[in-house]
Image (spheres, helix red, strand yellow):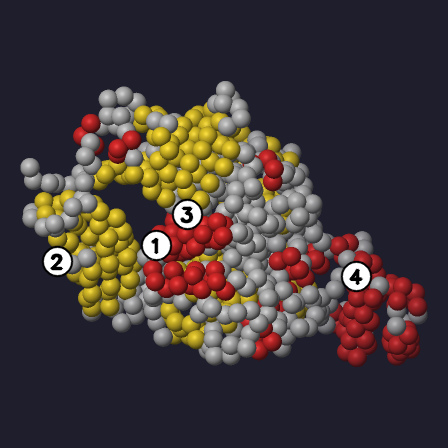
Amino acid sequence: MTRKEIKMLIPLNDQWTFYRAEEPLKRQTVRLPHSNITTPFNYFSQQDYQFVSVYEKTLLADPAWQGQAVLLNFMAVAHRAEVYVNDHLAMTHNCGYTAFQVIIADLLDYTAPNIIKVVADSRYSVNIPPFGGMIDYMTYGGIYREVYLDIRGPVWIQDIFAQGDANRRLQVQVSLQGQTAGCTLRYILSRDGVTFLDSETEQLSLAAVIHDAERWDIDSPALYHLTVELKNGTSRLDMQQTRLGFRTCRFTSEGCFLNGRLIKLIGLNRHQSYPYVGYAMPARVQRRDAEILKKELHMNMVRTSHYPQSQHFIDACDELGLLVLTEIPGWQHIGDPAWQTAARENVREMVQQYRNHPSIVLWGVRINESQDCDELYRETNRIAHELDPTRPTCGVRYIRHSHLLEDVYTFNDFSYAGNKPVLQRKSSVTRAADKPYMITEFNGHMFPTKAFDTEGHRQAHALRHATVLNQIMGDPEIAGGLGWCMCDYNTNKDFGSGDHICYHGVLDMFRNPKLAAAVYAAQSDEGAVLVAGSLMNKGEYPSALPDDFHVFTNAESVRLYRGERLIKDYPVLNDAFPHLPHPPVVLDDFWGDSLESEEGLSPRNAARIKNILKSISRTGPGRIAPVNYLRLLLVMLSSHLSARSLTALITRRFMSWGSESLAWRLEAIRDGKTAAVIEIGEQVAAELSVDADTLELAEGDTYDVASIRIRAVDTHGNLLPLFMEPVTLTVAGPLELIGPASIALRGGLGGTYLRTCGQTGQGRLTLQCGDLPEVVLAFNIHA
């Protein structure tokens, strides 16, 4: 009989039975991705998810599958997974962050229902990375990525390794399973319906030059589809597809060169966790993080700290042109020989599973922040280079003069504490002057910042990011820098702010931006960015005397108005941040010429008054320098003012008590035109500003999720950072809330998630907060 293709990819994400191993009678039906517990927002223990979970699913095997390859594909299970088919142990997998495949054809019963059982051990006692020491992040549990049943013929394509370089050379290597005698391979390269290559050969490898190929770049991420068909005569036995890009990324002591162009790598570290469900989120939510990094924060790189992350996230990085450093699981601790064997296998799985992604430019083959272990790291580097000779390796460390076995010296530099030094010099960190050097973490725990911290604290947080970025951009020996970190995250008891949250992000856990996010967003020319570091409230500052504040913008100048009166036009100056494309603008004069034109002071005396008040705002009225008393006396004498008159002037102009309330207005000016406007007036709660990443949801391989970001704003649309009121969430239609139905805003910010529940139709989310106007979002749910 002529062999022919038998190929089916069946999602197995619905109708799983879940229970704790010690509580087999307490069962529930769940859908994947699934977290073994639903957590509160904060104040929960890492012990809560440390138990053995059991997942069971009934599978009816089609008799036509007999004699075929029946493959069970798990995208990730946290953390040690045992897979049983009809009580037979089919496989044990020892990594919670990589995919694995179980061949189950010989274990199936084709005449009766089969029971697939997964025993997932998420206890910290398992002897695999990242466990064994302290860990500054929660590791959660469960089958938190998708599962698929893959039915193939007896001869099938196991793997495709495809790479294209900047010279448009295509290299492909294929691995097969089964009896391949008489078989050929057909290679088809296409993009947007146009075929660039169609070649059939008996060879398991292909080398070709695609003369018309467009390069993959951070600004134009051209992706190509490679289809490989396994054939026997005219019959097709199997077919697999992958994507690739034509690009060359090279690191030298001068920096990172993408397709021959020197680029400074700027980005953040990302954890894959979310409120309430830990790691367990489907494709749309994973992809959304890449979109935020690229489109909202205008990054060109992300590090998947401290483990390989969802293929959905990396797919989005490919499509958006966001470069990636991905690394093996771990946090400082190196275990015994069995643990190290698992770490080496993690390298193998990571490289094999992710090496076709053009966005990935660095393999992290060292346990994050671990001590030197030359025997282990010689092996991890060898494995990575053997499986992928096209990419350099790195190893993230915090120790100076570490043994450099990788290609790039990557260093976590937390030197900056608000004063010099900002960063250590490369020569003080490594003697490998001829090797590439990159900063992989900065800030973070050095200055934790909550959305509800004081205005001054939040501004200081933003300026710390700006200061380190400026240093990185100005140092030609540093290939780039990745700040710590993208989002706040739940963590273990030894870290964070006591509520089991590390407030290290430039975004909160719902991906709402803090002020520091504007530092990154403003470094791009894309769109108009204008974010003020202050809401101009005197009572936010000691002695009710505001200090200078910063505006973060990509404009050429910022105009400050009080009512309709122009106070000052501030050009963007590079004095304090000479290496930033768009440095922050310091607003230090809130009176303009009003002291001269309306109070009759001379320019010299007006300047004296302003300088005196600025000095007092920094030191407080109880520590007035003697020289300032002399300056006040000079103003009184030269302007013929009594002490009472001068006090009244200061109260009127600087305290504004009892005066007419006039709004402040900031205008960002680009190319002589107003590109963005902020109005700041009396802060009165006006409404909830609600942003849903989509109103169109689709039931596909599994459930879909919409991400909802919530902000309490005033009549001018400004965030109310001290608004902490509860919001009630009510859902109608075929939708479910992820998390509680009543949440508290923190720093005026909050969020929630809506997931589909297996049905189509129309759904609705209603948000209510006290006397504020009700907000209703309408959703369409499709098949």
| Residue at the extreme front | 337
Residue designated by label 4:
545
Disc 1 versus disc 3: distance between alpha carbons?
10 Å
Amino acid under disc 3: Thr
Residue designated by label 3:
98
Single out the mark in the foreground, 3 or 4: 3
User: Residue at 59% of width from left, 42% of height from top?
Assistant: 750
Disc 2 versus disc 3: distance between alpha carbons?
32 Å
Disc 1 versus disc 4: distance between alpha carbons?
60 Å
Where residue 190 sits: x, y (%)? Answer: 21, 57
Residue designated by label 2:
201
Helix, strand or loop for disc 4: loop
User: Residue at 60% of width from left, 32% of height from top?
Assistant: 742
Amino acid under disc 1: Gln
Disc 3 versus disc 4: distance between alpha carbons?
55 Å
Q: Do callouts 2 and 4 mark residues in contact (Cβ within 8 Å)? A: no
Where residue 311 sits: x, y (%)? Answer: 38, 49
Amino acid under disc 2: Thr
Looking at the image, tell me whether mark 1 or mark 2 is earlier in sequence order: 2
The label shown at residue 352 is 1
User: Could you tell me if residue 497 is visible in this image?
Assistant: yes
Disc 2 versus disc 4: distance between alpha carbons?
78 Å
Single out the mark in the foreground, 1 or 4: 1
Q: Residues within 10 Å of mark 3 (few under 14, many from 20)?
A: many
